[in-house]
Amino acid sequence: MKFFKKKWVMAILIILSIFLLIYLAVVVKLAWEGYQRQKAVDNFQASIEKPFREDVYGGKTPEQTWAMFLDALKKGDIDLASKYFVVDKQAEWKEKIKTIMDKGKLNTILKNFSTFEKEGGIQNDKAYYHIKMPFPESESGFIYSPVVFYLNPYTKVWKIIIL
């Protein structure tokens, strides 16, 4: 009878050991797959952040960025002027600036852009300004165009987001 009990105990221990090994294999497999998925997400996130981390064009204040932008326009440097915009709008503004220059309206734009005034100040990571431009058809003779800046959190330079 003792021998019979020992065999049952051994059989149960063997079966439990097999289930434990299978369970551990499943847990390890799931953990590895989770690690692989997280690694893929981290790589994707890094690829999205890369242009923002490498974007060093801009000033320590919105006013500095605006001055740098105007200086690049005065020099006719379209590539540099477009780099003062946020990364995802640089190509769009490069084309807009090129069109303005092709139409010979750069001097008018520079004159209009010279009346740059603070509007709402800095709130969180955005700064609000406006440009006061002559517009004879309006009641006051001027129109106000918003200029919004964004602080790049990676490089700590101010970028133009809306113009």
Image: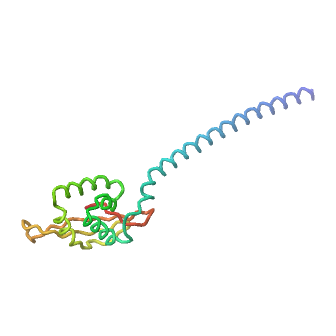
Q: Quadrant of the N terminus?
A: top right
Q: Residue furthest front?
A: 75
Q: Position of residue 43 (x, y in %)?
A: 51, 48
Which residue does the image show at 42% across and 66% down from the upper left?
156
Q: Quadrant of the C terminus?
A: bottom left
Q: Nearer the viewer, residue 107 or 122?
A: 107
Q: Residue furthest right?
A: 2
Position of 8 relative to 106 (above/below): above
Q: Position of residue 37 (x, y in %)?
A: 54, 43
Q: Is residue 91 left or right of residue 52?
A: left
Q: Position of residue 127 (x, y in %)?
A: 32, 68
Q: Nearer the viewer, residue 118 or 73?
A: 73
Which residue does the image show at 37% across and 69% down from the upper left?
59
Which residue does the image show at 19% across and 62% down from the upper left?
106
Q: Quadrant of residue 112?
A: bottom left
Position of 27 relative to 46 (above/below): above
User: Number of labelled discs?
Assistant: 0
Position of 161 relative to 48 (above/below): below
Q: How is the image coloured?
A: rainbow
Q: Position of residue 57 (x, y in %)?
A: 38, 63
Q: Quadrant of residue 144?
A: bottom left
Q: Quadrant of residue 31?
A: top right
Q: Is residue 133 left or right of residue 66?
A: left
Q: Is residue 149 left or right of residue 38?
A: left
Which residue does the image show at 33% across and 70% down from the upper left?
62
